[in-house]
Image (tube, grey):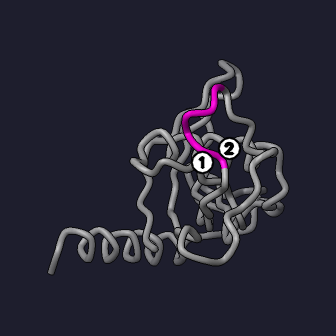
Amino acid sequence: MGVDAWLLLLAALVGWSFQENVTDCSHMDGADPGSICNIDKNDTGVQKAVLSATYMFNNQSNDIFLFKTLAIVDAKRQIVKGIKYILELEILRTVCRKTTDNPDLSNCHFQPKGKLYQIFHCHFEVWAIPWLKWMNTTYFVCRP
């Protein structure tokens, strides 16, 4: 098995292990500290975490084009000395090149179907400490 296959298997196992202990964040009364819960995909914190994750992906990618989020497939939250967002995202290549100074992803359109069209399914973990106005993508793995 190649490295990519092992990483994909690891991501699947991590995702599966999270599924067993996931609750709904709207019913957090009496929940164990550190427990993982589902969160609304439109939550402000989730939206900021998605943007942070997307910028991290673009900074790590060797692609000449920028990518942006097409869909938030799943969003979870864990309170751990801040907030850990666990995200499953679909990200798609845009028509904007990385050479653009200060690119605004909201102005970048997705690549049309064709040779340059590329989509990734990604698992991201983003740690936020809101009272310090700090956010960092600590882990991600993507597959085509």
Is disc 1 in contact with disc 2, using a CB cutoff of under 8 Å? Answer: yes
Residue in the picture at 41% in, 60% down: 141
Q: Nearer the viewer, residue 92 or 79?
A: 92
Q: Is residue 41 left or right of residue 56?
A: right
* Residue at 39% in and 69% down: 11
In the image, farthest residue toward the front: 115
Q: In terms of image quadrants, where is residue 140? A: bottom left
The residue under the point 68% across, 71% down is 73
Where is residue 111? Give x, y as percent: 67, 64
Residue 134 drawn at (x, y percent): 62, 25
- Count neighbours of disc 1 (C-alpha within 10 A) and say few if under 14, some if 14 to 19, many if 20 or more: many
Q: Which residue occupies the foreground of this view, 17 or 75?
A: 75
Give the residue type that dot 1 points to.
Thr
Which kind of residue does numbered mark 2 sit on? Leu
Q: Residues within 10 Å of mark 2 (few under 14, many from 20)?
A: some
Q: Position of residue 7 (x, y in %)?
A: 29, 68
Magenta residues span 96-101
The circle on residue 51 is: 2
The residue sitting at the bottom extreme is 1
Q: Quadrant of the N terminus?
A: bottom left
Q: Is residue 78 magenta?
A: no
Please say if 35 is above or below 66: below
Q: Which mark identifies residue 3?
A: none
Name the secondary structure under disc 1.
helix
The prevailing secondary structure element of the residues shown in magenta is loop
- The x and y percentages for residue 103 are 68, 34
What residue would you read off at disc 1? 54
